[in-house]
Image: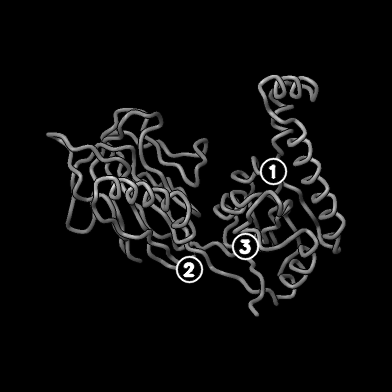
Amino acid sequence: MFDKIVVVTRRTRLEELIERFNTRGQAKFYLEHSGGDFGSYEKEHDTYHAALDQLRRDLDLGLQRQFLDRSLVPTYSFGPADLVVALGQDGLVANTAKYAGGQPIIGVNPDPARFDGVLLPFGVAQARSAVVETLESRAPTRAVTLAEAVLEDGQRLLAFNDLFIGARSHVSARYKLHMADSSETQSSSGVLVSTGAGSTGWMSSVFNMAAGVAAFTGGKCCTPRKLDWEDRRLLFAVREPFVSRVSSAALVAGMIADGEELHIESQMPSGGVIFSDGIEADYLQFNSGAVARLRASARRATLVVMPRD
């Protein structure tokens, strides 16, 4: 089934600092004079590259190998014979999954002491066996629902965790929201559409805010909605809706069932955007006249997971 192992990597914080300040010495000078701990950056960097070096050795299995920086993932063409290994934080798995085309992804945690690794079930020492079992079709996997935003001109953006629809800056987003037989014009900080995988992330913070406000005012609030990764439903929530003569706040949260769509019509002359999984650089323009259809994608992400006892 597979003839190539694609290892997706990420630059460390130290590497990003060196790129910004040109040399390691200048990066150290800047960080220490601003009160930062340069040693922490060095330790994280060394741990990551030690993990990467071990992975290079352990995945020498006679197949072609390609090491791909995360910045190149959106433009890389994943093939049907690619087995993907992501070495990094959870966000690396989420962002790779949008472009991998359903190819199995093995998430490897390079630094368990630093990263929780919800999407990184394997340590570096376990990576080889996980790859071998996947190559032999013995590894368990989960099919994770992705969300998608589709514009009328055919542009599409996938999301592993969530889609944000709103304004690029901190100004109010203006749009008209349509859900089933209901619609209303809104002004808000944007709309968040979440998958099951993302329901414990950004979306959970929206529920936390609502619960805190309700507690402060003496009201009652619902508990956060958590969906399974495979759930074909999506959650949506309107962030900080403003009520005025021309905007309402009756349709501010709900569930998008499998096969249904949430439609949003932009009323922003400029600066309207749709981005996914917190990556603002990878976005669709969403200005006046554009209509976005938000729904569960037919494409799913395939994550290799630990065997159940």
Q: Which quadrant is the C terminus positioned in? A: bottom right
- The 10 Å Cα crowd at callout 1, few under 14, some 14 to 19, many 20 or more, is some
Which of the two residues, 242 or 78, is positioned nearer the viewer here? 242
Question: Circle 1 sits on which residue?
Answer: 10
Q: How far apart are marks 1 and 2 (CA)?
A: 27 Å
In this rendering, the answer to whether 130 lies above or below 281 is below
How many numbered callouts? 3
Q: Where is residue 270 in the image (x, y as percent from the top left)?
A: 34, 28
Q: Regarding mark 2 in the picture, which secondary structure is present there? A: loop
Q: Mark 3 points at which residue?
A: 103
Question: Between marks 2 and 3, how big is the CA–CA gap?
Answer: 16 Å
The quarter of the displayed image where residue 117 is located:
bottom right
Of the residues under marks 1 and 2, which one precedes in the sequence?
1
Q: Which amino acid does label 1 sit on?
A: Arg
Residue that numbered label 2 is attached to: 230
Left or right position of 101 against 208: right
The image shows residue 232 at horizontal and vertical percentages of 41, 66
Residue mark closest to the camera, 1 vs 3: 1
- Residue at image x 34%, y 47%? 212
Measure the C-alpha gap from mark 1 to mark 3.
19 Å
Would you identify the image quadrant in which residue 43 lies?
top right
Instruction: Give the percent coordinates (x, y) of residue 308.
Output: 63, 77
The residue type indicated by label 2 comes to: Glu
